[in-house]
Amino acid sequence: MTEKKIVPKTAKKKTAKVVRITLVRSPIGTTYKHRATLVALGLRHINQTVEQAETPQLAGMLAKVGHLVRVEAGTGKEK
């Protein structure tokens, strides 16, 4: 009996959409979960900006702390 070789499909490179997130309000007085979400996003200081790939997980994080951040379209180069 001949064995079939399993050939993986070539993954198409998709350019992920990138969003620029800026912390515009202080997390002082917010809940622990909101502060932890900001740290997970990489935001520690007011007016600090990070670029993240747009994913469903990121959308959930931004929904939680949307009142503290400003979201814009990114440059397309994720760090």
Image (cartoon, grey):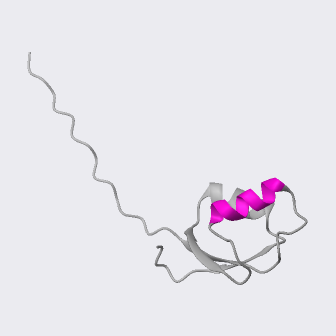
Q: Is residue 6 above or below residue 12?
A: above
Tell me residue 33's x, y (percent). 79, 54
Tell me residue 78's x, y (percent). 48, 73
Q: Is residue 10 left or right of residue 52?
A: left
39 in magenta: yes
Q: Residue, x 88% and y 63% (percent of image)?
A: 30
Quadrant location of residue 53?
Answer: bottom right
Q: Is residue 78 above or below residue 63?
A: below
Residue closest to the eye, 59 or 24: 24
Tell me residue 76's x, y (percent). 49, 79
Quadrant location of residue 74?
Answer: bottom right
Residue closest to the eye, 12 or 32: 32
49 in magenta: no
Residue closest to the eye, 8 or 49: 49
Q: Residue, x 59% and y 59% (percent of image)?
A: 55
Tell me residue 9's x, y (percent). 28, 47
Residue closest to the eye, 59 or 51: 51
Q: Residue, x 81% and y 73% (percent of image)?
A: 68
Residue sticking out furthest to the left? 1
Number of dots carrying numbers? 0
Dominant secondary structure, magenta: helix
Looking at the rendered image, the quarter that the N terminus falls into is top left
Residue interval drawn in magenta: 32-41
Quadrant location of residue 31?
Answer: bottom right
Q: Residue, x 80% and y 68% (percent of image)?
A: 66
Q: Is residue 79 left or right of residue 65?
A: left
Residue sticking out furthest to the top? 1
